[in-house]
Image (spheres, rainbow, N blue to C red):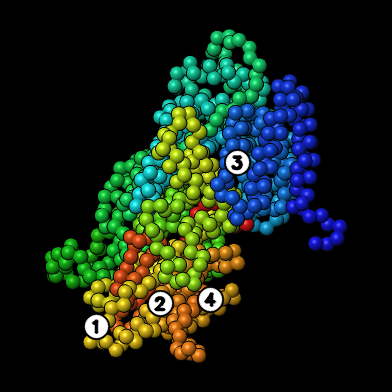
Amino acid sequence: MEPGVKDPVKNTAASWEVKHTESTRLSKDYCTSTGVGSPGIAGNAEADVLRSVKAIVRELEEGPSGVQCSRGMFRWTLHKKTERDPYSNISLVKILISELELAKENNKHYIVPLLNILMYAIIQAAYVPDDLFEKAYKFCKRLLSFAKPYCTIAHEYAVMLKAERKAPGVLYQRLIISEHGLKNDKFPHLEKTFVFADPDAISEEICNYLYNEIHSMNPNELLTVKMGHVIKHTIQAALRENCNINRLDEVLQNEPCNVIEGYFQEVVAITEQSCLSSEEVTTAQKKHISKLQQLYQTILSSAHQAPPSNNRLQNILLPKPDISFFMWKEDDLLWKELVQFVKNRFEGSQEIINSDSDNSEMSEPTDCPNFEQTRYSVLSTDSGIVRDCGDPPLLNDCLLQVASEKEPSKLSRRCGMKKKSHHSQDTLILSDIYDNTATGADIKLQRKFGCGMTLANFKQQKPYTARVMVIGDDCILGKLAKAFLSLRKRETRRSFLTKKLNLHFYYIPVMNEKQDAVSAGKVIPLLHNDLSCEMSRYLGSIDPWYNSNISSLRKMIPELARMTASFGQQSGADPFVVDVTTYYVRMAYQPVYFQIYSVTFTFTDETVECVDDVFLIQLVADLPELKCPKEGTLTRKRATSDGTWIQIAVTYKKIALSSRESTKKFTSRCTGLVMKAIPSNETEDIVCLNVNISEVTNKINLSGKVSLAENIKIRTSHIKIDVHDWCGRSLIVYLDKDSRRIYKNVVSIQVSPCLEPGYNLHKLRSSRFNHHDTENVGLTKYMPKRLLLPINTFAGIL
């Protein structure tokens, strides 16, 4: 470090103390000016909030190698404190803005976590002063000059802050409307959270704990109660201390449902109009406050005179979202639940029911030629006259031809298909299906991330959003990859969900204590970095806030499940896992994309057809016990003396950052191999397969001939392994650490990136008109080539 330059880490504590003194003084001044509470109490409350923020920063300083047992608890307790006291929320906003200024200069990896806490506090805040809004907005604007993901996240939050300042309470309002399906004409959007757990991968104790906690926090409240939350929060956010929240709550409780719904529709209309206004922020805000003031007087005018109150701010807590918990036993359960979700909300569902009743449309294609089983709307190049068509004649055409043999020159037109005036459901719309994905001509080794959707995204949104969360170890991610491919194949054949539904995936790790997952370390002893829940470890390494809040649940959920089973659920206890889950789905906007790999197996029995499958985490190939024919005694002894190995031929494409691929071939005496798709460290974070082959080599030293094991490392995207063994031995293959996905007697393994089903379909169509070997022709050059699975995080890749 240059002389005269202070170490930012060592000076962090001193900066905190200076800011703490300044924040306490500001809190006392604010309480004195508003006349609410005593400065001493406010100073103590703000000091308590500051200590919680400092604990979070210390947790971030430790990084992924820190203690995992208490991670996430500081953030959770901080938000619980602000829920109890709305004025603590104002203090939290002030403190976070000050700490963001420090982080901008000294520790940039603090920025995204602190911004995330700030936005969640603003969404729930009963009231935030305009000067704090202005400071937060200016800070986000200054981040626009930073690299990704800082600039993209700052832009999203700046838009949200501007919307919230124009129409106070709009973010809270949209969140409740979306999560609970409150019908209105201005913001018709519906969200639902689906939680899937694999009962074969985690213990029954954990499944019961998750089921009981999630369902205990979903009381069947009337929609009018949630509408009342929106009315009270929006009016209080605009009128601040001028709103008598106790009296307003009393009036709304005594009103009939139709009256409350009318007030709700009016509040939503006023808020959305102000939010979307093109006027200046201050002008739009004044008009918004004026309209809500009139509505507030109208509501209270129908009530009896109530005793005066001190008009203190009160937090209107966000109700928990609509969460459904499922035991993932059927492979197509995800597809069924998503279709049912859209069907239940879609008006005119008779059309959907009729279309879904077609078994040929709903059946899942397995390869490219099967796409042709379905009729698609294509541009006709013939006249429609039977004589001009190359198709075989239909039955009706044959009858017409027999009846008109005496008039051979007469032309007949074959029957046509009635086409709907609107876009056909079979039509693939690129802008709907392939939004924000890399095209076939834009395949890079760098991992793709970002491009999420926030509450303030004013573009034309799809009417539904499904937030799919999977809980478990790496096995359930492999199951999710298979389900996602199946869903994309269905949507390619008949686009139904894609044009109506935003689909987001989330992952919460839980250690597998029920079964022994397939370990790569057992296959290749030289591979020491075989870990459980590799996906969460990787996500925690690229996103410190994911590491603090989500990766810590890997061991915490099993511990909480054991404690609940031993001591029982305490009544009135705060549901920690549900709160963290809710925070995750609400604030994790940035997806990280992972390549799904397809694999084809060929078996020793030639009568058995090849099998296609996919994997997301890893593929492990091991050797069975040595079995040779009895007459091959000499060969068997020689093989045994050299160790258990098998002769394989490897053909692969070597990748390079310059995108220049070269084909390599070699043979090896292999004892096992592992293909990993998740990088083990940040320096290896490129989209490829890391292949490790354990090879037996013979070396001669003074003591004689010795067999040594060596590890061959390969980086590739396409690889083929063929077994050439004189004993007729084969491989056993395990996919995604799942002992249920085992393939035996394998003699050939061919792995390549899984292609997007829509790309396969259009490539097949284009090949009819283009007989050259051009890979990307027609629409295929604008379509994504590879199938990527997005998993949402808080920051993407820092």
Q: Secondary structure at mark 1?
A: loop
Q: Quadrant of the C terminus?
A: bottom right
Q: Which residue is mark 2?
A: 671
Q: Nearer the viewer, mark 3 or mark 4?
A: 3
Residue of label 1: 629
Q: Nearer the viewer, residue 187 or 637?
A: 637
Give neighbour class at mark 3: few <14, some 14-19, many 20+ (Cα, 10 Å).
Answer: some
Q: Mark 3 near mark 4, Cβ–Cβ under 8 Å?
A: no
Mark 1: few/some/many CA within 10 Å (<14, 14-19, 20+): few
Q: Quadrant of residue 658?
A: bottom right
Q: Which tag, 1 or 2, sits closer to the chain's start?
A: 1
Q: Amino acid at mark 1?
A: Pro
**Helix, strand or loop at disc 2?**
strand
Residue linked to disc 4: 655
Q: Earlier in the sequence, mark 4 or mark 2?
A: 4
Give how far across and how far down residue 371 sits, in percent: 33, 64
Residue 743 lies, in percent from the top left, at: 32, 68
